[in-house]
Image: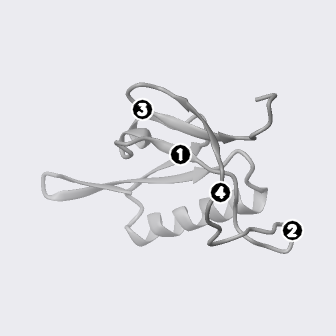
């Protein structure tokens, strides 16, 4: 969330990010929580839905050292996630000069 002062009024930009492999439930929860935060702040904030790989320049600008997309997610009945795993080998595909993004890709020779 970006908070700015415009004269005597505060202006807000609320961003919620949706990963390319996120479920409909996860996407819906993000939207609901964003709406609740918007309501809490009096309905004045501008909401931005950010989709992995298609983020706005405003959103990317918050991350001066770039964005790194890692595989994973939230543990649930359908998804197992390993936490606190060390010595993990990752291969990252890096793109961009001003707004850098790095996406984790598989380690196979076909990548």
Foreground disc of the pair 3, 4: 4
Q: Could you tell which of marks 2 and 3 lies nearer the N-terminus?
A: 2
Cα separation between marks 3 and 4 = 26 Å
Cα separation between marks 2 and 1 = 24 Å
The label number, if any, that marks residue 78 in the structure image: 2
Cα separation between marks 1 and 3 = 11 Å
Where is residue 105? Give x, y as percent.
70, 39
The label number, if any, that marks residue 88 in the structure image: 4
Residue neighbourhood size for the residue with mark 2, other residues' Cα within 10 Å, grouped as few (<14), some (14–19), many (≥20): few
Where is residue 78? Give x, y as percent.
86, 68
Judge whether 87 appears above or below 49 on screen: below
Tell me where residue 60 sits by quadrant: top left
Which quadrant, please, contains the C terminus? top right
Cα separation between marks 2 and 3 = 34 Å
Residue neighbourhood size for the residue with mark 1, other residues' Cα within 10 Å, grouped as few (<14), some (14–19), many (≥20): some
Can you identify the residue that label 3 sits on? 99
Where is residue 1? Give x, y as percent.
39, 57
């Amino acid at each position: 969330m970006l908070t700015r002062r415009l004269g005597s009024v505060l202006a807000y930009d609320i961003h919620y990010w949706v990963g390319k492999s996120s479920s409909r439930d996860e996407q819906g929860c993000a939207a609901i929580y964003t709406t609740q935060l918007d309501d809490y702040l009096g309905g004045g904030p501008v909401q931005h839905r950010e989709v992995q790989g298609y983020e706005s320049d405003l959103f990317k600008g918050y991350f001066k050292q770039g964005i790194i997309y890692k595989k994973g997610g939230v543990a649930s009945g359908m998804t197992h996630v390993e936490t606190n795993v060390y010595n993990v080998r990752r291969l990252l595909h890096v793109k961009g000069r001003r707004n850098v993004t790095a996406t984790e890709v598989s380690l196979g020779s076909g990548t």
